[in-house]
Image (spheres, grey):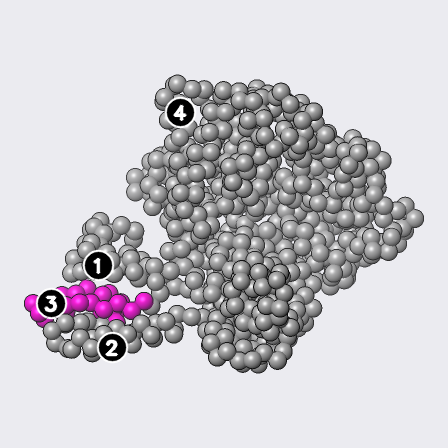
Amino acid sequence: IRDSAAPAHRRPAGTTPDGPEVPTGGAEVLDRIRHRFKDLPVFLLMTDSSDHDLEHLPLWVSETVVGYIWPLEDTPAFIAGRVTAAARTYLADVLPPFFRALKQFEDAHEYSWHTPAHSGGVAFLKSPAGRAFFDYYGERLFRTDLSISVGELGSLYEHSGPIGEAERNAARVFGSERTYFVLHGDSTCNRMVGHYSVTADEIALVDRNCHKSVLHGLVVSGARPVYLVPTRNGYGLAGPLPPATTAPAAIAARIAANPLTVGAVSPDAQYAVITNSTYDGLCYDTVATARTLAPSTPRLHFDEAWFAYARFHPLYQGRYGMAVTADTLPADDRPTVFATHSTHKLLAALSQCAMVHVRPAPRAPVEHDRFNEAFMMHGTTSAFYPGIASLDVAAAMMDGPQGRWLIDEAVTEAIRFRQAVVRTGRRITAAADRPDWFFGVWQPEHVTDPATGTRIPLADAPATLLATDPSCWQLEPGAAWHGFAGLTDGHCLLDPVKVTLTCPGVNATGRTESWGIPARVLTEYLATRGIVVEKTDSYTTLILFSMGITKGKWGTLVDALMDFKALYDTDAPLDRVLPALVERHRSRYRGTTLRELCTQMHEHLTRGAFITALDEAFHDLPTPVHPPRHCYQQLIRGGTERVRLADAADRIAAAMVTVTPPGIPVLMPGESLGDPDGPLLRYLTALEAFDRAFPGFGSEAHGVTTDPDTGDYLIECLRPRFLEGR
């Protein structure tokens, strides 16, 4: 321990104050413990000859350990008692506020005289099905499924007691001024924030790359949306909002050009919502974004459903909503910032468990009692207490150096997988014994070594560099690998834990190849191997690296990719590769080979300029005619009807249409479907034709009903007699 003067988290990676050596021996063990476990008690065992060694120990060791033990100076019982006392203190302190109180309540084994009626699970024991349910989950789950009647645990609505303490602790951990626990997912968080931030006939700036719950917030509030359009690349992936589109002059022009803003309460937007990071892992410089949008709105909402971990790793410094503070943005017009987290998605919490983080600014104060009205309107008085406990524990897991360690592990595994895919492709080329192609990864091809200034392939870069230097993942303006236009230095960063695999057939600039492997075929095969990906586009597929990813898990994926290549190269019969698909659609796929299917699908996508149609549909927005709330009211009162695409020209949509891939709204309620040969109907018609041509590979289209007999797409539209008035 004498050889190292500071733990690694207080030094540049891989160095000591005296040189490049890393801690070794006992110092290394102690250093790693400090990185992994917050406040874990550690004793140093000393020998008789080490009486004078205390003065030679580095100061950081004395700050880290809880004590020293000389085995021959005290009795074994006394030494054991010291260790036991330290362990008990640690176990008592390691539990976060609400989980500690919940555990203590459950340990008391009190009778339940309140809801829920299963009374600690006893009711389930009175039925065979109930008994099976009870045995499957165990008694403790049911004994902690409690009611607001248990006063000592506090109230989620009043934010009191241990629940309030847990929310305040989460606010400290996540860097907010106030945090609210939400038990119905980030969708409810978005509706809650939208409902609070903007009222009827006020203007809201909305990232078109938004979740449908943002639209629901507009419906509830009665706001008038003005959409901001992100850029797209040749793969069809949605990029960020270019900085020029959020400049004050551009925002003012967009508001002035929107028919829905006529007669609005004010010509200025009261609220803006931006998706950060995007589904594909693109995250903004939030401080710069807030600075740019500040003249245009007093309230800025970052929907960070997939980005709750950002605060806990240096790669994402300044790229999450709560990074916008009075210190980072001291301007008088700093907006109030909301960040909504789907905590369960990429941190450790139970499903549907989410948080709202708030950092108010003087120009748009957030009074708790007023916001709490929106909170209660979208919440429940029957909170699921294990869910609250999971949010409490999720915050505790991220607290201190252990949070950095957990996220760093996920980042590192994602980097290793990225490098493994590229290196596998190189090995195939070098072997020259099989067709020279493999899957790729959407990422920079080269990074800069800060020590030498030289450019090196990302696949050859040290993992420590890629895991600590954000410049390795920034989208350089004009770089071909990402294919997005209109970017500036530092505006956007690719999150390494969101890995997009690319298939042959097209590149990020939109150039198509003579042959290709559409990603839908690949993901259908991966599903047969028990590998379920997050999202599939025409030639890309997205996988997520969370805290639960292991080398064995991603190694299995690399093996499956190699197996698919072998099946394609040997032109394997499709009934051997995708037997369930062939069985479901025998008349279409019987006798087809894997290569033939890929060729047919690639030619169909290329011939129909599918990605170009997608880009035009998402870039040239439909004309807005009515606010979303008007359409919802007509939908409920029978003022809508389902219309085939062939008859839908110039009709007004009554419901949102979201197509996956790419998972972004292509049509919002109140918008016109436009001309028969306009970009929107061309794109939807191309989707319809694809689904007919390749049954089993259809797009997941929310807001579209498919006629089971003809395969026609049906869109919910306003009836003509309901078009008058708003």
Q: Secondary structure at mark 4?
A: helix
> Residue at horizontal 24%, vertical 65%?
60
Comes first in the chain, label 4 or label 2 = 2
* In the image, residue 61 lies in the stretch drawn in magenta: yes
Look at label 1 and name its amino acid.
Ala
> Residue at horizontal 71%, vertical 51%?
226
Between 71 and 190, which is closer to the camera in this rendering? 71
Q: Residue beneath label 4, please?
A: 428
Look at label 2 and name its amino acid.
Gly
Q: How many marks?
A: 4
Front label number (4 vs 1): 4
Specify the label residue 81 is tagged with: 2
Rounded to the nearest whole Å, what is the CA distance between mark 3 and mark 2? Answer: 20 Å
Comes first in the chain, label 3 or label 2 = 3
Q: Secondary structure at mark 3?
A: loop
Q: Residue beneath label 1, please?
A: 27
Q: Is residue 136 left or right of residue 312?
A: right
Q: Is residue 396 left or right of residue 702?
A: left
Q: Residue beneath label 3, please?
A: 47
Magenta-highlighted residues: 40-66
Residue 225: where, in percent of width, then height?
72, 53
Q: Secondary structure at mark 2?
A: helix
Residue 546: where, in percent of width, then height?
47, 50
Residue 312: where, in percent of width, then height?
43, 57
Front label number (3 vs 2): 2
